[in-house]
Image (spheres, helix red, strand yellow):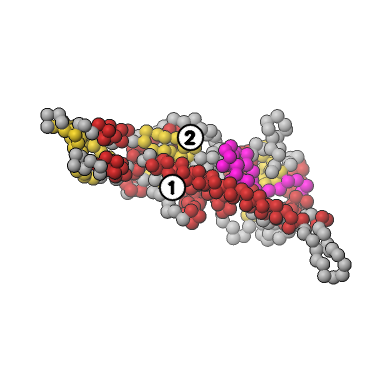
Amino acid sequence: MIPVSDGQDERIVAAAVIPVTPGSVPLQQQRSAETQGLIEALDCDCAFVDILNIRKPTPSHLFGSGQLQAIGENLEAHDCQLLVVDGTLSPIQQRNLERSLGCKVIDRTGLILEIFGLRARTKAGRLQVETARLSYERSRLVRTWTHLERQRGGRGFISGPGETQIEADRRMIDSALLRLKKQLSDVEKTRRLHRSGRKSRELPIVALVGYTNAGKSTLFNALSGADVFAKDMPFATLDPTIRQIELERHKRVALVDTVGFITDLPTHLIESFKATLEESMDADLILHVHDVSSPDMEEQSEDVLDILEDLEDITGKPCPPVIDIWNKADRLGTEEKSYYLAHFDSLRPDENNYLVSAMTGDGLEAVRKAILQHVFEFSQTCDVTLGTEQGAALAWLYRNAIVLSRTEENDGNTVRLSVEISKDELNRFRKDYAEQIDKQIQIRTENVN
């Protein structure tokens, strides 16, 4: 782990280089700004971010000798203690770069893991970060401890070498991973119990997903009235936060704020955060939050969809229905905003696109109505006739359904209600009340939609 500043000590000065190799995917327009944001999210000062074109990557250092010398001079000039290579480094390349440059070197995966380690607050979050970190480090054990190896034991030529330092390190990491995965399994069981508890209370789940720094936490606060940490920086949210929100017609849902996605998010990191990310796959509805002000919006949206597909494979669960929320409309000019509104109006209604600003609140009422319509789309209108002595059943309907009208018949001995109720709630009512006293309660249903 990198010894980040605690606010009192002198801050670490870091720099970054973004390697561009032949055949690699074109960089996003804001890749330099994103890399700088990631470094600052680690509470480090970013001295510079350079983009380097590498015509022929070298197996030992990735960079050529001339580029390596220029990087070293630049690091020395800015007195940097950390170099971030915003790409993928092999273990050998990382070790050789550290020896040549005389400073700590990490790649993109290592940087994301460091940020996650800094942001984790709950026990579950810390377990997930540690599991991902050890899985990453296990693949990066290289022969830097050969002076500790036992070459041969005993006499003659039969006895082979003893356990090498690499083997000992790998064995210790494997033992720690087994322990952590067992603890994570317990976390997953607890999360499943919590989710089943919400389901048993007939509380639908709506999950916010999106690229990191798209404004999910700000939107979460605006919709729920909560005060979770929201800041214009990558991975401001790591541990999922859940709040209950009330919509029109007294309908309630559980809103879940999740960790942000990012380009080149490692698969083993997704697997380690399975317990957290399953909140999205178990939702009844997903709100995909886009940063409409970003020039890389399309690429970022594709990255999120790719990760959702990975989650389908990892969890074995189909992706829930998705509503697209185009956030940060307050950063658009008048012409840009008019363009998006006209474009969304031209789409089919079932494509579900909403232009909003979580900061100003514009468009949020339409999002609330969309959530209500999609989550409770199986609502039905029912005529329920029951005796006045069935007070418990009557009270249950007033709590869990929308009473449209009430008529008393048979000299006040019978009550006839017209209610709007979801399919699940109606089944629950039948099970708890109507099946037990079927002769005294009559139900006639008809779909609302």
Residue 245 location (% of width, % of height):
40, 34
- The quadrant of the rendering that contains the N terminus is top right
User: At label 1, which amino acid type do we have?
Assistant: Asp
Residue under the point 31% across and 36% down: 400
**Among the 4 quarters of the image, the one containing residue 412:** top left
* Category of crowding for the residue at label 1, using alpha-carbon neighbours closer than 10 angstroms: few (below 14), some (14–19), many (at least 20): many
| Label 2, residues with CA under 10 Å away: few <14, some 14-19, many ≥20 | many
- Magenta highlight range: 101-130
Residue 234: tell me if it is visible.
no
Q: Quadrant of residue 368?
A: top left
What secondary structure is marked by label 2?
helix
12 relative to 404 in the view: left or right = right
Residue tagged 2: 218
Q: Quadrant of the C terminus?
A: top left
Q: Residue at x 42, y 54 (%)?
A: 318
Q: Nearer the viewer, residue 172 or 266?
A: 172
Residue bearing the label numbered 1 = 282
At x 43%, y 44%, the residue is: 196
Place of residue 84 in the rendered image (x, y in percent of width and height, measured from the top left): 67, 46
Q: How many angstroms separate mark 1 from mark 2 (CA)?
A: 22 Å
Is residue 170 on the magenta stretch?
no
